[in-house]
Amino acid sequence: MQESESEGIGYFLAGQLFGVFEVEEWQVQGAAIRFRGNLLAQPETALAILRQRLEPNGFLPLLSSTREILILPIPAGAKRGVAEKPWPQILLFVTTIFTTLFVGALGQGADPFTDPTSLLTGLPFSVSLLSILGVHEMGHYLTARRYGVQVTLPYFIPAPVGLGTFGAFIKMRSPVIDRRSLFDIGIAGPLAGLTLAIPVLMIGLRLSEIVPSGGRLGISLGSPLLFTLVQEMVLGPIPEGMDVLLHPVAFAGWIGLFVTALNLLPLGQLDGGHIAYALVGRQSEKLAFVTAVVLALLGLTFWLGWLFWAFLGFMLGFRHPQPMNDVTPLDPTRRLLGLGALILLLCLITPSPFMSPEF
């Protein structure tokens, strides 16, 4: 942006702020312009007026504080009226159906390479797992749409090994309005997924077998507190020297709990990152850093997979995009629910989710 052009735009935008924000000074920062002064209206009212004035002209207001407003061009992906083509999501979802069927069949001792029809033995695992992931993502999707945030349909990530999938995600194509909507969008996915994961786990445990401990091939799974409570409720105390051989449906339920725990980590663009920013704003960067360090220590001590999540946190950074209204704090009810999300994380996480079998 040339200096004369930026000055002209700056004066134009300063005029649009009249009656809403008293401008004391402004400066160009790349494609954005930062205004400092005094907010003359309630943040919610000010944002509604500024959006009405600025968005038709291709600009987006961000209320950073009562003393500062950042105005930037609307990103191309956030412009309304652009129809989304869902073919990538459909293709990825169909592929993920096959990969989860394949992994589920292998877990049942079938060989899909020599007998393709044996893929059907992976159906209980595939349907259970994809249902949990799908409900999780639709929780985000429907809540975001309720708040007028433009989002994509879920992207499922297929994997030919491991669990058959690396999970799913949606992309927000427009800014979130305020911390309240950011909090609701962030927490909706874990709560929605959990409401299905727990019944799936209970059904799967009913179908599981109690067998002698040790001497089995495969992996042993960690037992987070919530899993242990559900298992006790469904199966009662497990006799000494015995263990539970999880049915594929129960395994999918266990994964649902594990995925919920991962998403609740207060890191970057994870659900927990959204929740943390809604609660404490830019202080969430410090919380994300501490979380990454703790994950690294867990990875060095218990399960190497935590190193990947720590690395991901450091690579993607700890900053979280601010909502359009970053001034209005959360209400007490949502703050209490945020504390509940932290307690839920502690009930779902385990230092060693995957362990070597005992022989």
Image (cartoon, rainbow, N blue to C red):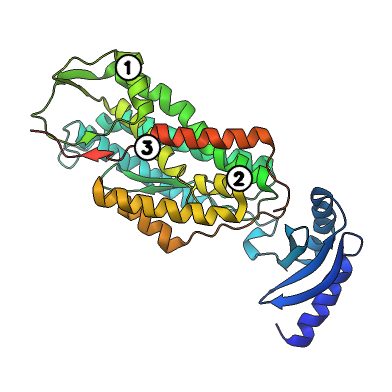
Q: Going by the picture, which residue comes out furthest to the right?
A: 19
Dot 1 or dot 2: first in sequence order is 1
Kind of residue at badge 1: Glu
Image quadrant containing the C terminus: top left
**Front-most of residues 13 and 154:** 13
Residue with the mark numbered 2: 279
Q: Residues within 10 Å of mark 2 (few under 14, many from 20)?
A: many
Quick check: 329 left or right of 163?
Answer: right
Image quadrant containing the N terminus: bottom right
Q: CA distance from mark 3 to mark 1?
A: 18 Å
**Front-most of residues 64 and 55:** 64
**Front-most of residues 177 and 266:** 266
Quick check: 40 left or right of 60?
Answer: right
Residue with the mark numbered 1: 232
- Helix, strand or loop at label 2? It is helix
Q: Which residue sits at x=85%, y=73%?
A: 12
- Helix, strand or loop at label 3? It is loop
Dot 3 or dot 2: first in sequence order is 2
Residue 263 position in % (x across, y down) = 45, 43
Q: CA distance from mark 1 to mark 2?
A: 34 Å
Residue with the mark numbered 3: 349
Residue 162 found in image quarter: top left
Residue 276 position in % (x across, y down) = 55, 47
Q: Which residue sits at x=80%, y=76%?
A: 9
Residue 312 position in % (x across, y down) = 39, 57
